[in-house]
Image (cartoon, grey):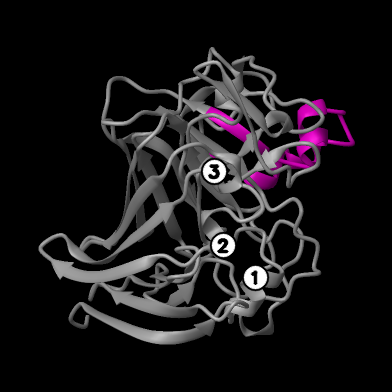
Amino acid sequence: MTQPRITRTPFGATADGTPVDLIALHNGKGLEMSVLTYGGIITSLKTRDRDGVADDIVLGHDSVAAYEANSPYFGSLIGRVANRIANGRFTLDGQTYALAKNNGPNHLHGGLKGWDKVVWKADPFQDRTGVGVRLEYTSADGEEGYPGTVTAHVVYTLTPDNRLVVDYHATSDKPTVINLTQHSYFNLAGAKAADILGHELQINADRYTPVDEGLIPTGELAPVDGTPFDFRTATAIGARINTAGTAGNVQLERGKGYDHNYVLTRSGDGLQLAARVYEPITGRTLEITTTEPGVQLYTGNFLDGTITGKGGRVYPHRSGFCLETQHFPDSPNKPGFPPIELRPGGEYTSQTVFAFGAR
């Protein structure tokens, strides 16, 4: 293996002329990752298969212009609030806030210009924990309709044992809401693989949050037992995904596949298992642990072959999956869900760890 190293190079500019850099991180043990200052986007993530062959396992683009023009949140940091808020509205301390509606009648992933579409300050580092980059962004009071000036720090670290650690921190000068996540689309079979249906997935959850026609949670915490949503034991993603249209599972029909939040089975605080994934052809594995109470499984249902990504590759239907650790969708409007309020003097903290391997 090589020595750990970091490089920083220009990567063009946004449409308004703001320069964008690419930070390439190498942990010296076979794990390589590239990150843009635009959106905190993970543009490339290379891991080794069972034969020691490295390949890129995330979807993305080759230019800032392509990310700006046609990207379904490939590799992005999502904020202020990940996932959907019903009708683009929520009430906090008796005041109602109107947000941008960018997903039909609803608000999605921070709005028209969420944190996936801004340029972050970046400070690469190498220390005893590994190699990484500290990202910082200050979101102005009223941005996309949210109250409070929020200062956010997100740290990506590649450790010597082939883990990607993502640490989130935020403070606010007014009461507000916040729910951050990382939106990488994975395909452990590699850059030229067709789809992710053969990946074997395990999710540490007995319950999930069913959705209405607009993909807003109904508020129910429904058991996965006896449903296509039961991934408590490792099961191929594609094994039951086409229940929609055959047996008529209304939840799969609404999501056009899996696009649902799972209620993780937790005991206490700290990092706990969210999911495990195994790709049988290459042997690549992914284990995700998190401090978050939920994880959104999304199976690339809206990828349809119209997006051309890295190296001219066309991304067909279900060519990537996302496992977005998070608080639950529409939490500000669901009193029974874990709250996402952030108040002055407090600090939002969250951690998710992606551990890569092969067998």
Do the residues bearing badges 2 and 1 touch, measured as CB atoms within 8 Å? yes
Amino acid type, residue under disc 3 in the picture: Gly
Residue span colored magenta: 234-262
Q: Which residue matches tag 3?
A: 142
Relative to the observer, which residue lies in front, 126 or 115? 115
Q: Earlier in the sequence, mark 2 or mark 1?
A: 1
Residue 83's quadrant in the figure? top right
Q: Which residue matches tag 2?
A: 117
Q: Dot 1: what SS?
A: helix
The residue positioned 32% from the left and 31% from the top of the image is: 344
Relative to the observer, which residue lies in front, 189 or 115? 115
Frontmost of labels 3 and 1 is 3
- Which quadrant: the N terminus? bottom left
Q: Which residue matches tag 1?
A: 68
Amino acid type, residue under disc 1 in the picture: Glu
Amino acid type, residue under disc 2 in the picture: Lys
